[in-house]
Image: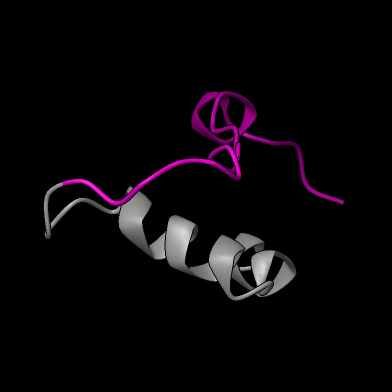
Amino acid sequence: MSPRTEEQKNNATIPPRSSSESGEEWHPRNKAIKALKEDKLAEWKRT
């Protein structure tokens, strides 16, 4: 296994809360919220 870079070490993937709402149309968090509402969070985490 290769050592992780500093950028990889600091890149946390934290899903939004289940009660969160979509914000502005372009915001990347909306994709995560949609996956959470459709119960596809595991699929979202892999992207």
Q: Residue furthest front?
A: 19
Q: Residue 43: percent from the left, percent from the top?
A: 66, 74
The image shows residue 26, relative to residue 21, as above or below, that is below
The image shows residue 42, relative to residue 9, as above or below, that is below
Horizontal side of 4 relative to 10 (left or right) equals right
Q: Is residue 21 magenta?
A: yes
Q: Residue at x 59, y 76 (%)?
A: 38
The quarter of the rendered structure image containing the C terminus is bottom right
Q: Residue at x 74, y 67 (%)?
A: 42
Instruction: Depth check: give the residue in front, 1 or 41.
Output: 41
For the question of whether residue 14 can be seen, the reply is yes
Horizontal side of 14 relative to 1 (left or right) equals left
Q: Residue furthest right?
A: 1
Horizontal side of 2 relative to 14 (left or right) equals right
Q: Residue 24: percent from the left, percent from the top?
A: 12, 49
For the question of whether residue 47 can be seen, the reply is no
Quadrant hosting residue 10: top right
Q: Residue 25: percent from the left, percent from the top?
A: 12, 59
Instruction: Depth check: give the residue in front, 1 or 34.
Output: 34
Q: What colouring method underlies this structural image? A: one colour
Q: Is residue 17 magenta?
A: yes
Quadrant hosting residue 31: bottom left
Q: Residue at x 58, y 37 (%)?
A: 17
Query: Which span is picked out in magenta?
Result: 1-23
Horizontal side of 6 relative to 43 (left or right) equals left
The image shows residue 37, relative to residue 33, as above or below, that is below
Instruction: Give the prevailing secondary structure in the magenta stretch.
Output: loop
